[in-house]
Image: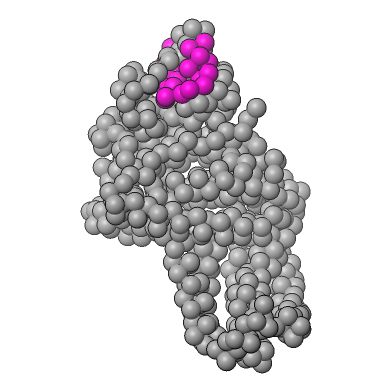
């Protein structure tokens, strides 16, 4: 937690309220270079309950992967569950989350994330739809088809033995969770999705914070694409469908610059006198269709998720999701170009903390 | 703005309103052909009565015909009064993007209705 005074006590209260056996639960609350009251709050809980241990990081490399590496080194259990500071796990979540580890082949388990502030404004409502699709359909389908659900870095758990077997988190990657998912799979571990393990989170309430989030995911995911796309294609023992899905999953953020390129090409042809550029537009439309009804079927996924959730009224906002879509194309394209430029000059793109809104 | 552009560089602008109308009709014709296929795929997965599926598909297609004609008329009138300089903007924002939006809108209405129907059928939710 870095500067999480707004939410720190909520997550700690929720974890202490868990019905997980007291003698088997160890809560390591990390204060990572905070300048507000976060450490004070953590220490209060550590004094109040022996299950809570405060870990203060004032030196060394800041950021979630480095902080988790430090904390896991001191953890005593076999299974490590990770929660970001803005998450609120339900009372029975930990029990449900660790149950799949009865299977010794399971390396990581991911739970379902549900926004708790979805009614705040249009953005949070749209993100609620997006999250429903991402978990209820995308992750669940990957689990059902024995593909690769993603360990999402929070509201999930992993086996400590598997974590060390693949070398722990890499602090140079912005999406350390996706990176860990692929390393676990390549090492032969199973990654599972448990839809019933619902955990509540705070989604971004402003477009600026949302933009930062997309930017980080785009860069991190593309870092993983470079590392794992070829390995997933050539790794023996994987099914063909698993290879194809993995490459598409890793390359999802590359669709945005491709779409941007198609639009620029269309504009160029337009001014060159080629308004009859139906073929170019059909390619653009085909890519849009790929995003609409294809593997990453954002709109179709949302419709299906809402249907499965049984709460249909919110789906009427679906057409407005095109705002999210347009924002993503612009932000992802900008982020990948900027990141590419930084890499060219040997500069690193750093971790950014997500702003909280809870009062 | 349009007047300034066409005063200095009018000969470099490669289109007329008639060109636009030609391309528009051809592009919209492709959309009309795609709509039944697209809706068959996305509505086919919903547990809806085939008659209702057909109703939503027909409604979308009829709306597509009507909206294409309305847009073309409005855009041509707009070019007449505001100038052809706006043609690229209209072409890129008023065409496929709006087609995509109303297709998604009809789909969301179908999903919303399906959810309401399913809520009344308790046996659907039993494991």
Compared to B127, does A162 lie above or below?
Answer: above
The residue segment tinted magenta is A22-44
Q: Looking at the image, can residue A204 be seen?
A: yes
Kindly identify the residue that appears in the image at 57 percent across and 87 percent down. Answer: B9
- Pick whichever, A144 or A138, lies toward us: A138
Left or right placement of residue A189 versus residue B87 in this view: left
Kindly identify the residue that appears in the image at 51 percent across and 37 percent down. Answer: A354
Numbered disc total: 0
At which x and y percent is residue A14?
A: 56, 22
Compared to A4, does B15 lie above or below?
Answer: below
Q: Looking at the image, can residue A131 be seen?
A: no
Task: Judge whether residue A33 is colored magenta.
Answer: yes
Q: Quadrant of residue B4?
A: bottom right
Which color scheme did the rendering employ for the protein? one colour
- Pick whichever, A176 or B118, lies toward us: A176
At which x and y percent is residue B7?
A: 63, 87
Kindly identify the residue that appears in the image at 46 percent across and 14 percent down. Answer: A52
- Pick whichever, A4 or A297, lies toward us: A4
Left or right placement of residue B95 versus residue A69 in this view: right
Q: Quadrant where the C terminus of chain A lies? A: top right
At which x and y percent is residue A100?
A: 42, 33
Kindly identify the residue that appears in the image at 55 percent across and 23 percent down. Answer: A5
- Pick whichever, A97 or B106, lies toward us: B106
Task: Judge whether residue B112 is colored magenta.
Answer: no
């Amino acid at each position: 937690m870095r500067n999480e005074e707004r939410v720190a006590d909520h997550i700690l209260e929720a974890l202490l309220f868990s019905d997980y056996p007291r003698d088997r639960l160890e809560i390591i609350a990390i204060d990572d270079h905070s300048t507000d009251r976060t450490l004070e709050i953590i220490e209060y809980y550590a004094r109040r309950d022996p299950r809570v241990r405060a870990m203060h990081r004032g030196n060394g490399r800041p950021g979630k992967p480095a902080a988790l590496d430090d904390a896991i080194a001191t953890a005593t259990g076999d299974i490590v569950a990770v929660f970001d500071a803005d998450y609120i796990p339900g009372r029975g979540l930990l029990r449900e989350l660790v149950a799949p580890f009865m299977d010794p082949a399971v390396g990581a388990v991911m739970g379902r994330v549900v926004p708790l502030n979805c009614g705040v404004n249009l953005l949070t409502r749209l993100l609620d739809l997006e999250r429903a699709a991402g978990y209820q359909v995308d992750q669940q389908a990957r689990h059902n088809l024995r593909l690769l659900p993603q360990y999402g870095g929070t509201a999930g758990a992993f086996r400590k033995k598997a974590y060390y077997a693949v070398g722990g988190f890499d602090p140079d990657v912005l999406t350390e969770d996706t990176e860990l998912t692929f390393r676990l799979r390549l090492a032969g571990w199973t990654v599972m999705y448990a839809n019933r393990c619902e955990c509540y989170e705070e989604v971004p309430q402003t477009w600026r914070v949302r933009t930062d989030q997309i930017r980080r995911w785009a860069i991190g995911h593309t870092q993983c694409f470079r590392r794992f796309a070829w390995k997933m294609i050539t790794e023996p023992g994987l099914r063909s469908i698993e290879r194809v899905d993995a490459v598409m999953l890793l390359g999802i953020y590359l669709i945005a610059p491709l779409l941007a390129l198609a639009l620029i090409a269309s504009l160029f042809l337009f001014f060159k006198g080629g308004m009859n550029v139906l073929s170019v537009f059909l390619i653009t439309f085909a890519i849009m269709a790929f995003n609409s009804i294809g593997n990453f079927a954002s709109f179709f996924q949302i419709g299906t998720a809402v249907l499965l959730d049984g709460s249909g009224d919110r789906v009427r906002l679906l057409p407005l999701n095109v705002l999210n879509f347009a924002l993503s194309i612009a932000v992802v394209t900008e982020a990948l170009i900027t990141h590419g430029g930084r890499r060219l000059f040997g500069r690193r793109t750093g971790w950014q903390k997500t702003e909280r809104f809870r009062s | 703005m349009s007047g300034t552009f066409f005063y200095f560089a009018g000969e470099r602008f490669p289109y007329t309103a008639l060109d636009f109308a030609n391309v528009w009709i051809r592009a919209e014709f492709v959309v009309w052909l795609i709509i039944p296929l697209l809706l068959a795929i996305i509505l086919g997965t919903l547990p809806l009565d085939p008659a209702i599926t057909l109703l939503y598909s027909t409604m979308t297609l009829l709306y597509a015909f009507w909206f294409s004609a309305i847009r073309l008329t409005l855009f041509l009138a707009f070019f007449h009064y505001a100038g052809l300089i706006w043609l690229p903007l209209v072409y890129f924002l008023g065409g496929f993007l709006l087609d995509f939006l109303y297709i998604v809108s009809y789909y969301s209405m179908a999903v919303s209705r399906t959810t309401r129907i399913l809520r009344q059928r308790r046996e659907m939710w039993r494991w």
